[in-house]
Amino acid sequence: KWGPPNNIPSGNGRTLALTVCSAAIGGTFQYGYNISIINAPTSYVQRFINDTYMERWGVGLETPQLTLAWTIIVSAFSLGGLLGALLAGPMAVRFGRKKSLLLNNSFLLVGAVLVLTCKMAKSFEMIILARFLVGINSGVSMNVQPMYFGESAPTHLRGAVAFSSAVFTAFGIFLGQVVGLTELLGSEPLWTYLLASNSVPGIIQLLTLPWFPESPRYLLIDRGDREACARALGRFRGGEAPVLEMEEMLREQQQQHLVTLNSKSSAKTPWDLFKDRGLRSQLKTVMAASSAMMLCGNDSIYFYASYIFLEAGIPPNKIQYATIGTGASEFTASILSNFLIERAGRRYLLIGGYSLMSCWSVVFTVALILQGRGVAGMPYLSMACVFAYILSFGLARPAAYMVAGSFMWMSLFSVGMLFPFIVNGLGNFCFLPFLVVCLVAALFLGFTLPETRGKTLAEITEEFDRKNKHVERPHKETDEPSEEQYDCIYPTAVEMCLIDSVALITLLSL
């Protein structure tokens, strides 16, 4: 039985809030946590690699070779994330949103076992494989979790629930840095337990998420189970399923059915999406925004914080505490941006965040140059610039989550491989490449990205068309919409699956 004829949810939303916490603790929280925990045991893992290699071959690795081996371990996470992002769409359709998140923990648990046994096996290759599996886990969860949230939350809370992903990411980064302190798990005897500690949030999710409902939209549109959808929707709303929400999903189910019947072809390839002129401007914007989010170097700061703060002149015994400041900065910014985003809009936060990062890159470079000339206080100015850089990125990350996808993981892999060599090669000028990325991103997004606040997917598409001087799509309403109208307004199921799998445009409508 459906509830009263209004779209105001009954109850206090406790089930939805607990579902968000349960899904996120094994989702985007894990992404942030796994980014930060790899920094603390840097020297210990490098020593393990060198000792293992010497035991095998009777000779140790030279510094460049050791640095390369370490960057492979770090970047395996990004390569796994790319694969996970591509697996996310098919998994979400085949198994459902909730079950995909639960199955996703298997990658995490296998990775934890590999890390815990690598010393016994005397194999640093097991760490590479473990980081790759952890990356798959993050790639899947970062795509499926926002989908689960967006389909389960009421319209008026959808934006806030979606942006909670950024808050959990920042909290994961911060907590990973705290756990990595030498007083906790950051000592040499415990570094394997530090890298395996990511299994704890996964176990928490396995114990809690099964008690919460599946996505109502998935139950109705993908499985065709109206009764299960009504029950799940009622639980999320704290009472009976609101009539208007049910009717809206039923209309969407009918539209999807008509689109499938009227589709000109049974399958579309990713290349077809690139050839579609109606999607070209959106694709370019998505590629630019998601790539800039990683090429700006922010997340690599967490991978290689020790390198950066050593270069900045921070005393080695203080670096672990300075590193916690980076996580605290992003956590603060992610909370602040949730208050700003509905007032300032996604577009201005993206442009403003990258513009501020450009400014701090310049100040950081000047501070490093002055430090080399013996000017007092520059190490702490450099540290403050790093904090400010991350604070500025924290303003852009929640908005960028809405247009991120596989390009994010490819970019993170590239920067993860190159970052130590950039620091060693450019020295005081190591942030200048990121200055260029931030400037280009701010200018490009300023010219191409429309504001998405409070708009539907169709409205955003029209805005893209107007902003990029495309032909307007038909709007005339008839009792029987034509095949052309459906193709213009509603993507096919296969096309939506492809878009979901690379997170191209699905969250823009929030």
Image (tube, grey):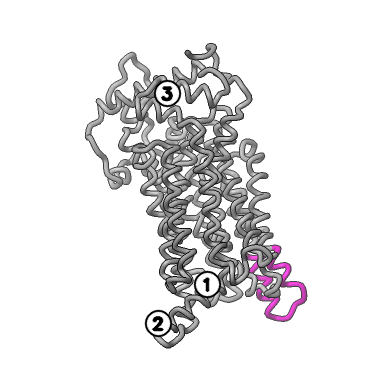
Mark 2 to mark 3: distance in Å?
A: 58 Å
Mark 2 surroundings within 10 Å by alpha-carbon count, few (fewer than 14), some (14 through 19), many (20 or more): few
Quarter of the image where one finds residue 174: bottom right
Magenta segment, principal secondary structure?
Answer: helix
State whether residue 282 is above or below residue 324: above
The residue wearing badge 1 is: 45
Side (left or right) of 11 relative to 110? right
Q: Which mark is residue 228?
A: 3
Rendered location of residue 302, percent (x, y): 58, 62
Residue 382 within the segment the image draws in magenta: yes
Badge 3 density bin: few <14, some 14–19, many ≥20, Cα 10 Å: some
Q: Amino acid at mark 1?
A: Val
Q: Is residue 197 magenta?
A: no
Q: Give the CA distance from mark 1 to mark 3.
A: 49 Å
Q: Nearer the viewer, mark 2 or mark 3?
A: 2
Is residue 119 shown above or below 205? below
Q: Compare residues 412 and 184 and report the one nearer the observer.
A: 184
Magenta region = 362-384
